[in-house]
Amino acid sequence: MMLIMLHFPLRSSIVPSLRMAAGRWLSFVRRARLVTLGWFVPCFLLLVPAWPWAAEPSVVIKFSHVVAPDTPKGKAAQRFKEIAEKLSQGRIRVEVYPNSQLYRDRDELEALQLGLVQMLAPSLAKFDQLGLREFEVFDLPFVFPSRQALRRVTEGAVGQELLQHLESKGIKGLAYWDNGFKILSANRALRVPADMKGLRMRIQPSQVLAAQMRTLGALPQELAFSATTSALKTGLVDGTENPPSNFWTQGMCAYQANIVVSYHGYLGYAVIVNKKFWEDLPRDLRQILEHAMHEATQYANEIAQAENDADLQKIRSECKTKVVDLSDADRKLWMDALRPVQVQMANRVGNDLLVRVQREAAR
Ligand code: LMR
């Protein structure tokens, strides 16, 4: 009590009663010769609010995404949460909402801009919805021969410049997280590009992906990710494309008889945050979040390939779906068929950007 009186400016009306209570406490302690207890109790009362377990989080981050928890993105979001909460000793709470629990694709971007959620990791194909066509460069078929080639772009000057374009939309780009290269599925046998003719294929909202499907003679159908499995089930669409991790965790193989492991295009994410929220954070908490993001990004990009390989293996062994691997000759047929898309879409994504990406990817 004495300590409290020394440290806090109290209103005059309560000072006398606190003084009386402190006096009574001290005379009790003296009479009972409980010297240790006499110090311990007030110190304990003062320290309680400083214990981590007693602290209320001062920052709450709602991190919304559309895929399952057991995917590269789902696992990395969870890792980010764990690190941020541990390092901040409870001052930060990260609430992860997977599987479009809070918002579907398009809505989640609006929710971020309105500050209804603070963090997302949409696939790069989804940024056209904000008018940022240049992100569609990542959707071009056969533009990245490997993950290393992709990484040179995302981690180099091009990747950083693209993230800066988000700022005009009230969004800050923090990192790129991998998923992987896509497979194609349908209820018709798929081996060569001609097998795609006439198929209604679900795509993400990207004009480059629409052009890719049209070039193959298929009919692109834009649908939210959360609506895709039921659209395959009801026959609203005939097929789709996604990395194996999304295909497996959404249970798509129950409704798709055939897969071709084409790895024709890439699907990855930009982790983004509401810019104002980010800039208003206390500096120490922002540093903790930057550190947590750095660790989660390394983790995401380390596990993505293995997660997709494991999920493709599960599809092979646990689904009735027939999985076709491409010979070099068949793969060349797909590459030749899709080559015109880069030329058709160069203006849309930006000629200079495309040349820079191609140069980095080919290094
Ligand atoms: C899709 O819509 O197919 C993907 O963007 C889903 C995701 O976030 O991986």
Image: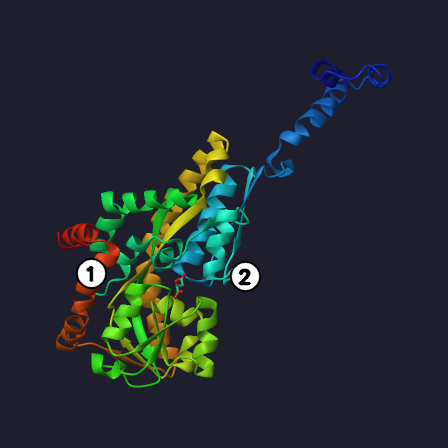
Is residue 36 visible from the viewing direction of this image? yes
For residue 101, which numbered disc appears in the image?
2
Position in image of residue 92 (x %, y %): 54, 40
Position in image of residue 334 (x %, y %): 18, 74
Secondary structure under tag 1 reads loop
The residue type indicated by label 1 comes to: Val
Secondary structure under tag 2 reads loop
Identified at 79% across, 17% down, the residue is: 11
Identified at 29% across, 58% down, the residue is: 136
In which quadrant of this rendering is ligand 1 seen?
A: bottom left
Position in image of residue 290 (x %, y %): 41, 39
Q: Is residue 239 left or right of residue 341?
A: right
Q: Quadrant of residue 165?
A: top left
Q: Quadrant of residue 20?
A: top right
Q: Is residue 123 above or below residue 59?
A: below
The residue type indicated by label 2 comes to: Gln
Mark 2 surroundings: few (<14), some (14-19) or many (≥20) residues within 10 A: few
Q: Is residue 56 above or below residue 7?
A: below
**Viewer-side residue, 240 vs 9:** 240
Position in image of residue 228 (x %, y %): 44, 72
- Judging by the rendered image, the residue that carries numbered circle 1 is 143
Instruction: State which tag comes first along the sequence, 2 or 1.
Output: 2
